[in-house]
Image (tube, rainbow, N blue to C red):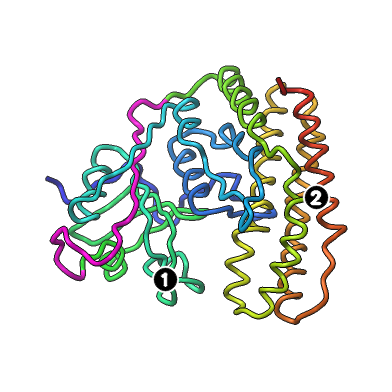
């Protein structure tokens, strides 16, 4: 069996990311799983914006906001992309090679410690779970090309060995938790005509709108946020960053994607969507200064009153959902 495989060939340093990762967005990166799927779909010549209806169902979950993801069924319906779990029973690198050779992108949970694209943050400094999309791998050269966050990167050498556990022989029995891994099958891709794609996206909008929170999530978040700030004042700055990622960043990035989705539909003839799109955009923008205010309140122990900010976020959520319900509700 060949020791190297790749799906797409990108000139070194020339990969152009999708517009959803543009630096001028309020939240150019969202979470690792959504970000890598944006780029996988983009690399396959598909538009990920059509698949963003799931953002309408995001909720406050108690200790976090919804860690939103592309529902795999939605991707299959829109584009014929089928995703399966990969059962790890031998070296993860061997599995990755076999699946990439079959034209499948391997989505693998890995340790951010070995990812050079995180230089200045996690790379070689801390261990954290993240997901990458492997589309090129060379076992002989110890080189891997992967999607992560908002871009496409290459790692090699010792980073490759660390990432794939090559520093000790694989024997099928290990004291590390094996990485959760999926593979995306691209052999039956569909590229629907614009009108057909719009119709499918509207159908997904209706389904996810029907699954939206039954009560305003910002009303539920308000008392919990006040309690969280008090608790975080006694903890490390690193704990605040973890908290912010699970809360403010998640709903901020989510609703910016929701705005992009509605404007994508509006550009294809769906009426009366600019109002809710503007509300979602304003919510995403408001999340940025809210995150800064929270950081200052925690680190400098400054007083913080978020009542007005959360009331505005809640009012905009109500207005956007009411408008969408009037247009697409059952």
Is 312 colored magenta in this rendering? Answer: no
Q: Quadrant of residue 303?
A: bottom right
Residue sitting nearer the eye, 220 or 266: 220
The image shows residue 266, relative to residue 315, as above or below, that is above
| Residue 35, x across and y down, in percent | 52, 49
Is 230 left or right of 149, judged from the image as shown? Answer: right
Asked if 71 appears above or below 68 in the picture, the reply is above
Region in magenta: 167-189
Q: Which mark is residue 313?
A: 2
Of the 4 image quadrants, the one containing the C terminus is top right
Left or right of 201, for residue 124: left
Which part of the image, by quadrant, shows the N terminus? Answer: top left
Q: Position of residue 108 (x, y in %)?
A: 36, 52
Q: Which residue is rendered at x = 60% and y = 17% of the image?
A: 195
User: Mark 2 Cα within 10 Å, few/some/many (few <14, many 20+)?
Assistant: many
Circle 1 Cα neighbour tier, 10 Å, few/some/many (<14 / 14–19 / ≥20): few
Location of mark 1 (residue): 127
């Amino acid at each position: 069996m060949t020791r190297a495989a790749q799906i797409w060939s990108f000139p070194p340093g020339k990969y152009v990311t999708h517009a959803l990762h543009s630096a001028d967005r309020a939240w150019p990166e969202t979470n690792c799983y959504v970000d890598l799927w944006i780029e996988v779909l983009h690399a396959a010549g598909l538009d990920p914006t059509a698949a963003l209806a799931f953002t309408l169902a995001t909720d406050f979950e108690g200790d976090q906001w919804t860690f939103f993801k592309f529902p795999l069924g939605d991707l299959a319906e829109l584009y014929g992309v089928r995703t399966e779990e990969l059962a790890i029973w031998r070296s993860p690198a061997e599995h990755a090679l076999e699946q990439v050779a079959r034209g499948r992108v391997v989505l693998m949970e890995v340790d951010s410690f070995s990812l050079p694209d995180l230089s200045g943050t996690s790379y070689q400094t801390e261990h954290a779970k993240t997901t990458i999309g492997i589309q090129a791998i060379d076992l002989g050269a110890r080189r891997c090309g992967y999607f992560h966050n908002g871009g496409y990167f290459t790692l090699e050498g010792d980073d490759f060995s660390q990432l794939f556990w090559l520093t000790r022989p694989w024997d099928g029995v290990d004291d590390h938790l094996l990485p959760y891994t999926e593979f995306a099958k691209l052999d039956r891709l569909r590229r629907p005509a614009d009108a057909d794609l719009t119709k499918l996206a509207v159908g997904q909008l209706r389904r996810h709108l029907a699954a939206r929170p039954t009560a305003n999530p910002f009303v539920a978040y308000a008392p919990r946020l006040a309690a969280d700030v008090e608790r975080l004042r006694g903890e490390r700055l690193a704990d605040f960053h973890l908290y912010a990622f699970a809360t403010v960043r998640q709903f901020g990035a989510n609703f910016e994607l929701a705005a992009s989705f509605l404007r994508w539909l509006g550009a294809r003839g769906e009426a009366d969507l600019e109002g809710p799109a503007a509300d979602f955009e304003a919510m995403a923008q408001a999340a940025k200064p809210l995150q800064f205010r929270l950081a200052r309140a925690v680190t400098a122990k400054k007083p913080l009153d978020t009542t007005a900010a959360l009331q505005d976020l809640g009012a905009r959520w109500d207005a956007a959902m009411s408008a969408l319900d009037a247009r697409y509700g059952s």
